[in-house]
Amino acid sequence: MTDKTLPLVVVGVDGSDDGLRAVRFGTNVALRVDGEILLVNAVDDTLMAGAWGVVYDPEVLQSAGLTANEQARDLALSLGLPEHRIKTEVVMGSPGGVMARLSEVASLVVVGRRAASGVERMFVGSTSVSVVANASCPVVVISAAAHPNPVGQKGIVGVGLQTSPGSEHTLAAGFEQAHRLGARLEIVHAIQPPVGLFARKLSPAQLDEQVRFAKGGIEAIANEAAQRYPEVQYRVEVAVDSPINELVSRSAGYDLLVVGVGESPIPGLSLGGLMRGLLAHAECPLYVARG
């Protein structure tokens, strides 16, 4: 179905504004990397059977998927991607599972994020969570409602850096995305102050010492990573706050927020509260690198 000599961008298509936002982002990536795009509409087979028997006609779902793919294809063409580098498929199966399987042959997966406003933002869509947790390649999660403007207008890419194994891969992905967008890079690390009734309280001087120590270590790693991208200007920011508060508040000023997720021996259980919180509340597209 695809030319394996070209980078492949897989995009989830469902006919929604979020899906079209994903198509636009994925198409622009394919144009920059001289790759091709696979537009996929997954027909969730759980919709076709319920407690009262058949709920949806499979032919109706198939037709709706073809219509959504055609709309997405027209958008990719309008953005300048050659027709021979655009593929479309309607696949039977859960959207999260389908996208995770396709990620095994993709360079990047792009999905739209539902529930982008009001109380709904407390519950990020299950498809986004499933894809991020189980994908074999990097994933971009994007929302038409939460971040509708074209990516690249702000000129800053953020990378949320933790001290867990695999952080070097996340940092490298941050430099790569800043290079791709011609943007500056802001490397952010948040030190969570001790909380709880029995937590050992730290004095302002002790917190300052932790900040200086963390910043020095991150700058040393960043200096090494920056050698591959000498044209990317960057700075290191270390804050005393919860990581979710710090990254969400900063995300409004980014074109893209790069974060990392590690490998989990149990599929689907690698996402912690920080990642789920960012999926629900980040105010810019989220690029999830694999550790």
Image (spheres, grey):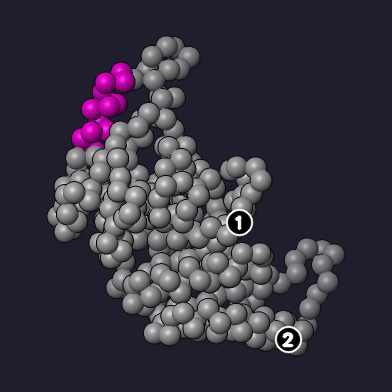
Q: Is residue 263 left or right of residue 195?
A: left
Quadrant in which the N terminus appears: top left
Residue assigned mark 1: 262
Viewer-side residue, 242 vs 130: 130
- Name the disc covering residue 26, or none: none
In screen coordinates, is 282 left or right of 28?
right
Question: Which residue is found at the position 53% from the left and 71% from the top?
Answer: 171
**Most prominent secondary structure in the magenta stretch?**
helix
Residue at 39% over, 85% down = 231
Q: Which residues are magenta?
A: 57-68
What secondary structure is found at the residue carrying circle 2? helix
Q: Is residue 164 visible?
A: yes
Residue 94 location, x and y as percent?
44, 33
Instruction: Check disc 2 and give the amino acid type.
Output: Glu
Callout 1 amino acid:
Gly
Q: Percent x, y for residue 89?
A: 29, 37
Q: Nearer the viewer, residue 227 or 278?
A: 227
Question: Does 240 lie within the magenta span?
Answer: no
